[in-house]
Image (cartoon, helix red, strand yellow):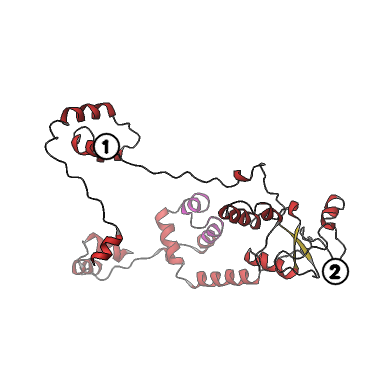
Amino acid sequence: FHAMDTLHKHNYDLSSAISVLVPLGGPVLCRDEMEEWSASEASLFEEALEKYGKDFNDIRQDFLPWKSLTSIIEYYYMWKTTDRYVQQKRLKAAEAESKLKQVYIPTYNKPNPNQISSNNGKPAAVNGAMGASYQAQASLIGRACESCYTPQSHQWYSWGPPNMQCRLCASCWIYWKKYGGLKMPTQTDEDKLSSSQPIEESHVRTHMSRQATQGTPVRNTGSPKSAVKTRQAFFLHTTCWTKLARQVCKNTLRLRQAARRPFVPINCAAIKAEYADRHCEVAGNPLKIKSTRKPLSCIIGYL
């Protein structure tokens, strides 16, 4: 540290710094912080470092008030190069490895709420409740799978909204949970009722029925048209007078400035007045109107 400080004081001139370090009378011997600290002070420092970490202000305030902050920081970085620091670091790593690391995973025995029958074909209780749910499950017995249309399975699961009363077999239920879809397309009772509707609307309703959350009923407002709202087509047809006004009234109608401020209304009265005044001036000079594109058939015939 003394050599670095001397080199800095001489503007990093190596020759002049060495001449100061080695004067005519002989080399200058400097003691570092490791030699100036006693054994008791070293133990106090290790105890403080264990308690406060690298908060040197608290270490100096509570444990070593007679030491300067510079000497404490210098001693810390020299202490990290000693064998004692390496030994303590190894002991801490060994203690961390020897600590018991155990993760408790409780058993998960919660029944599936979509399970509707057992192996013997009798309806099973869902979450211990028998009654309205029992009657709803009993009505599902005898119905085929909504995906593969099989009438037999060792386990059945309710699928879709409760009012549709649909069910899936065990293999199709696993397929549904994994991919979110059915193996084969299905036609539910709700789709049969809406068969007279347009194809696009029935497709959307079928998609909504398949993607419905398990056990969540579908909202019905009473009107089948309220489920899908068709947007009305929008077409802006510009008249010839408007096209002429764009070229005649360029001083009043500034299209680029108006496009940057779409919420500011345009003064149509001023545009009409200017067009009425200048219409006679430009009557003799025909305006250049952008030509329309020829149809594709004419272009193919020309080629």
Hey, what amino acid is under mark 2? Asn
Name the quadrant containing residue 122: bottom right
Q: Quadrant of the C terminus?
A: bottom left
Compared to residue 204, the image places residue 170 above or below, namely below
Q: Position of residue 50 (x, y in %)?
A: 56, 60
Determine which of the numbered discs, if any, sits on residue 119 in the image. 2
Q: Quadrant of the N terminus?
A: bottom left
Which residue is nearer to you in this view: 183 or 105? 183
Callout 2: 10 Å neighbours few (<14), some, many (20+)? few
Determine which of the numbered discs, if any, sits on residue 64 in the image. none
In the picture of the structure, the residue carrying the numbered disc 1 is 242
User: Is residue 126 visible in this depiction of the protein?
Assistant: no
Name the quadrant containing residue 107: bottom right
Which residue is nearer to you in this view: 13 or 124? 124
Compared to residue 159, the image places residue 269 above or below, namely above
Compared to residue 133, the image places residue 178 above or below, namely below
